Amino acid sequence: MVGTTPPRRRALLWGASCVGAVVLLWLASRRVPLWPDVLHLPRPDLLVLAVLLHVPYSLTRAVRLRWALPPGVPVSRDLLVGSGLVSFLVILLLPLRLGELSRPLILARAGVAGLGLPEAIAAIASERLLDGLLVVGMLFLGLGLSTAFSPEFAALVGSVERFGLASGAVFAGLLLALGVLAFTPPRHHDRLGGLVRPLLGARLGEFVFHLAAALRPIFTSARGLALVLASILYWAITLLQLWLVLRACGLDLGPGEAAVIVAVVGLSIQLPGGPAQVGSFQFGAALALQLFVGPADLLGPGASFGALMYLLGLVGAAALALPGLVLLGRDRRRSPVDPSPGGPSEARPIT
């Protein structure tokens, strides 16, 4: 059972999050104003298009999880989309990425046969690690395609590349670990269990083998390829939306530069920033813009872009969480709910 966080631990988490946010905001503010004195928006029509894109962006992000869930699990469209729209806001609002647990919990408590907490966590973990690798790939592809460079590009690009390589190694290592876990033959479970259970405990050890069984279809069937293609589509929409906001603010940058900015911001929000990604988003945007935008443009168009892009993500997630709650309520009224927190999942061997 998932218990509530003790008050002291909760206070420490929020305190550490706020300290991290203050540090990152200070670092970002040294280069780019956190808020523009005057909004620089020469192309408001492009901003309108970027806002409209937030609906397909959010729906694609929510729906692609279907190909990471176990095959044959009867997850309704309402539950799939509703859990995604609601969890996106929770992820933004909670500190230190703690909101990542929200969607697995929503799915596991929906009472869907064959979908317990291990299956939901396996799906989310696979999706996030795939995102990490795609973001790192987009970083280096964007750097190769970029043609506009700021005076500070040469001094900063080495740090950005090292950050990308380190992040890529972490994501690839974790994905490899999940793959090894998924392909572990059942005949080795007893031997592996003798090593895992004393370290993790009997309950967590059983959870690990549940997780392995849930991961196997992602690595061994066409579902994995479908997940990759859906994720590429999601990041393409993300790239287009950010490029539209750049051009709306008067920053004449191309797709390569936009890809680098998407990647740097995507990696930076993994840092321990504050609630609503305060600090981590601004730090990533400031770092990425310095690669391609000179000091003069950072003050007006750069600050406007950072503010508008941040508000678009936050306000868009808040607005779409409301229909998400409606979809979850409709699914709950239509389906009986299993009262157990882990859902009705049963352990099954990897075959």
Image (cartoon, rainbow, N blue to C red):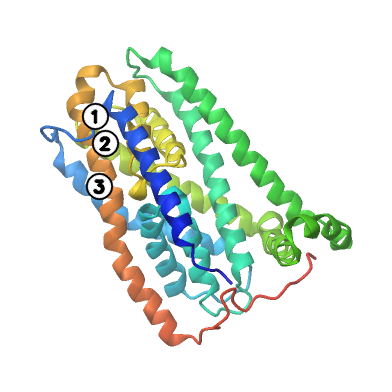
- For residue 99, say whether it is visible: no
- Front position in the image: 130 or 240: 130
Query: What residue is shown with label 1?
Result: 302
Q: CA distance from mark 1 to mark 2?
A: 6 Å
Instruction: Give the amino acid at mark 1.
Output: Gly
Residue 155 position by quadrant: top left
Assess disc 1: are there few (<14), some (14-19) or many (≥20) residues with their C-alpha within 10 Å of its C-alpha: many
- Front position in the image: 229 or 1: 1
Residue found 62% across the figure and 59% down from its top: 122
Q: For the residue labelled by badge 3, is the local secondary structure a helix, a strand or a loop?
A: helix
Residue 319 position by quadrant: bottom left
* The C terminus: image quadrant: bottom right
Q: Earlier in the sequence, mark 3 or mark 1?
A: 1
Q: Residue 81, percent across and down? A: 42, 67
Are circles 1 and 2 on residues that touch, CB within 8 Å? Answer: yes
Q: For the residue labelled by badge 2, is the local secondary structure a helix, a strand or a loop?
A: helix
Q: Earlier in the sequence, mark 3 or mark 2?
A: 2
Return the mark for residue 311: 3
- For the image shown, how many numbered marks are present on the structure? 3
Residue found 47% across the figure and 63% down from its top: 102
Q: For the residue labelled by badge 1, is the local secondary structure a helix, a strand or a loop?
A: helix
Q: Is residue 256 above or below residue 17?
A: above
Are circles 3 and 1 on residues that touch, CB within 8 Å? Answer: no
Query: What residue is shown with label 2?
Result: 306
Instruction: Give the amino acid at mark 2.
Output: Gly
